[in-house]
Amino acid sequence: MKGFLIFTLVFFLLIKPDEIKAQVFKTETGTVEFLSKASLNEFTGESSSLNGLVDLEKNLLDFFVDLNTVKTGIGLRDRHMRENYLETKKYPFAEFTGKIESLPVLTKGQSRDVTAKGKFKIHGVEREITVPGKLTMVSDNELKLEAQFKVLLSDYKIDIPTVVFYELSEEQVVTIQATLRK
């Protein structure tokens, strides 16, 4: 019996740390896109510099994007968005930190719908939000994350431009896609 306990302890000490490390998936090249759908103007902004991690062992999600990397396709609009509305010199990042409500069993090749709850921070304002999404275990070393949520600009004290050709919707639809690796 004593030999079995020693074997179990050695097995746990030698094997368990690798399993724990193996549960952390990271990305530096995820995409984040926002859709602004106002009555006279619709446009998207996109960045492929989404950084983040999913730690399945600790049930932790943490994602952030440098808002200076978001591009809408029109340089002048990008500059005005950064300088006048997002104020990226003062608030350069948007970040979500949270947990999955009910962590599913992930099997290679299968997708699972998930809901994350946590704090979203942009423009110096942090609010609790719920984000529906999907996790797919692509392989033992690769996890795919897809999520979409809505942001009301007034909730984060972001002014809406009054100039017609910069018309912006109060509600922004944010879509995240990332392939994370161990």
Image (cartoon, rainbow, N blue to C red):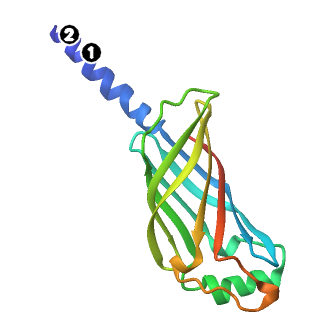
Question: Residue 6: horizontal and vertical position, in percent?
Answer: 22, 17
Q: Is residue 89 left or right of residue 4?
A: right
Query: What is the secondary structure assignment of the residue under circle 2?
Result: helix
Q: 102 or 58: nearer the eye?
A: 102
Question: Residue 102: horizontal and vertical position, in percent?
Answer: 42, 40
Residue visible at 50% across and 62% down?
96
Amino acid identity at mark 2:
Gly
Query: What is the secondary structure assignment of the residue under circle 1?
Result: helix
Density class for disc 2 (Cα within 10 Å; few <14, some 14-19, many ≥20) is few
Q: Is residue 116 above or below residue 5?
A: below
Name the residue that disc number 2 marks. 3
Name the residue that disc number 1 marks. 7
Residue visible at 36% across and 29% down?
16
Residue contact between numbered discs 1 and 2, judged by CB atoms under 8 Å: yes
Q: Quadrant of residue 44?
A: bottom right
Q: Quadrant of residue 78?
A: bottom right
Amino acid identity at mark 1:
Phe
Density class for disc 1 (Cα within 10 Å; few <14, some 14-19, many ≥20) is few
